[in-house]
Amino acid sequence: MKKIMFTGIKPEVTVEAIAAGLEKVGPVAGVSIIRDGDPQAPVVIVEMDISDVRAYQLTTRVTDLWHDGRMINATLLLH
């Protein structure tokens, strides 16, 4: 199971929207949206049942990607 952290996501994001978007990459086991701190800049943690290679590909493709006027970043969490 891989945990990937996404930043730069719009504040109105939903768990369902994140899961639906990432299901194309692989099975999504869980999505947590952390709105503490700056509610306009939520942090999204996604647990996915994907290989190391797929996790690397996802994070490198998404990092520094402009989407809806925001720069999205993805980081593979080691724990």
Image: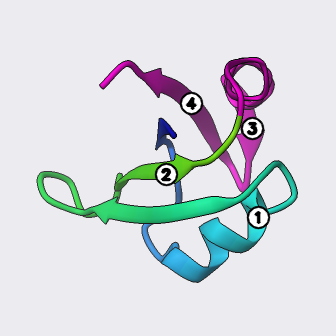
Q: Residue furthest right?
A: 24
User: For the point 62% across and 61% down, which residue is it?
Assistant: 28
| Closest to the observer, 68 or 36 | 36
What residue would you read off at disc 3?
66
| Secondary structure beneath label 2 | strand
Instruction: Tell me: residue 27, above or below residue 66.
Output: below
Q: Is residue 72 left or right of residue 36?
A: right
User: What mark, if any, has residue 59 been given in the picture?
Assistant: none
The residue under label 3 is which amino acid type? Trp
What residue would you read off at disc 1?
21
What residue would you read off at disc 2?
46
Nearer the N terminus, badge 2 or badge 4? 2
Mark 4 and mark 3 in contact? Answer it, CB < 8 Å.
Answer: no
Q: Position of residue 32 (x, y in %)?
A: 36, 63
Residue 63 included in the magenta stretch of the image: yes
| Secondary structure beneath label 3 | strand
What residue would you read off at disc 4?
74
Instruction: Tell me: residue 18, above or below residue 26.
Output: below
Nearer the N terminus, badge 3 or badge 1? 1
